[in-house]
Image (cartoon, grey):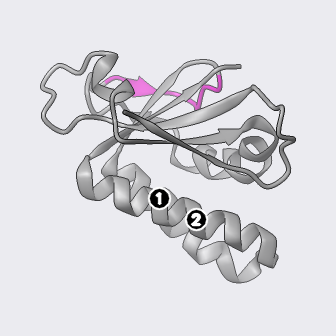
């Protein structure tokens, strides 16, 4: 059974538009929808938080190469699947860590939780799909 965690800072409780982080099953050779929707823990970030707090970091790692298909993904897409490999995640995490001293305490708490979740997920897999529902 998949556990969903919502990381929230500004988003109201009733917010439905979001991005979700799905670690891909590391044993999948040709990943199907089930290989990233049947993971133990999904992280959900509502649009009110994702856009101001995460989009600038996603913009810094895009364009990036889809680790499954090897196609270039030109930009982060809030409406579709974004396949992000471990190297790109590590780059994004390093950028966030470098910016932490300049963040307010509230923002730091948000980012620290995100970094911990990503670190744990990347111990299990090399690919995390970020899926938007905009």
Residue 74 included in the magenta stretch of the image: yes
Q: Is residue 17 left or right of residue 82?
A: right
Quarter of the image with the C terminus is: top right
For the residues labelled 1 and 2, the Cα–Cα distance comes to: 6 Å
Query: Which type of secondary structure does the marked residue at label 2 adopt?
Result: helix
* Location of residue 113 in the rendering, given as x and y in whole percent from the top left corner: 58, 65
Answer yes or no: do the residues labelled 1 and 2 have beta carbons within 8 Å? yes
Q: Is residue 35 left or right of residue 4?
A: left
Query: Which type of secondary structure does the marked residue at label 1 adopt?
Result: helix
* Location of residue 79 in the rendering, given as x and y in whole percent from the top left corner: 63, 19
Span shown in magenta: 71-78
Per the rendering, the mark at residue 102 is: none
Label 1 crowding class (10 Å Cα cut-off): few <14, some 14-19, many 20+? some
Per the rendering, the mark at residue 117 is: 1
Residue 6 included in the magenta stretch of the image: no
At a point 76% along the width and 41% down the height, the residue shown is: 51
* Location of residue 115 in the rendering, given as x and y in whole percent from the top left corner: 51, 64
Per the rendering, the mark at residue 113 is: 2
At a point 23% along the width and 35% down the height, the residue shown is: 25
* Location of residue 56 in the rendering, given as x and y in whole percent from the top left corner: 69, 50
Asked whether 107 or 1 is in front, the reply is 1
Vertical placement of residue 20 versus 90, above or below: above
Q: Is residue 65 left or right of residue 61?
A: left
């Amino acid at each position: 059974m998949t556990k969903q965690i919502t990381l929230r800072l500004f988003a109201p409780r009733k917010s439905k538009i979001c991005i979700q982080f799905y670690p891909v099953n590391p044993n999948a050779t040709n990943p199907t929808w089930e290989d990233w929707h049947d993971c133990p823990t999904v992280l959900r970030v509502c649009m009110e938080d994702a856009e101001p707090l995460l989009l600038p970091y996603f913009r810094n790692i895009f364009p990036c190469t889809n680790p499954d298909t090897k196609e270039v993904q030109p930009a982060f897409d809030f409406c579709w699947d974004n396949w992000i490999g471990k190297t790109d995640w590590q780059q994004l995490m390093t950028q966030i860590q470098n910016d932490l001293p300049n963040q307010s305490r509230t923002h730091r708490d948000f980012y620290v939780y995100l970094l911990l979740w990503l670190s744990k997920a990347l111990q299990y897999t090399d690919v995390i799909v970020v899926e938007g529902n905009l």
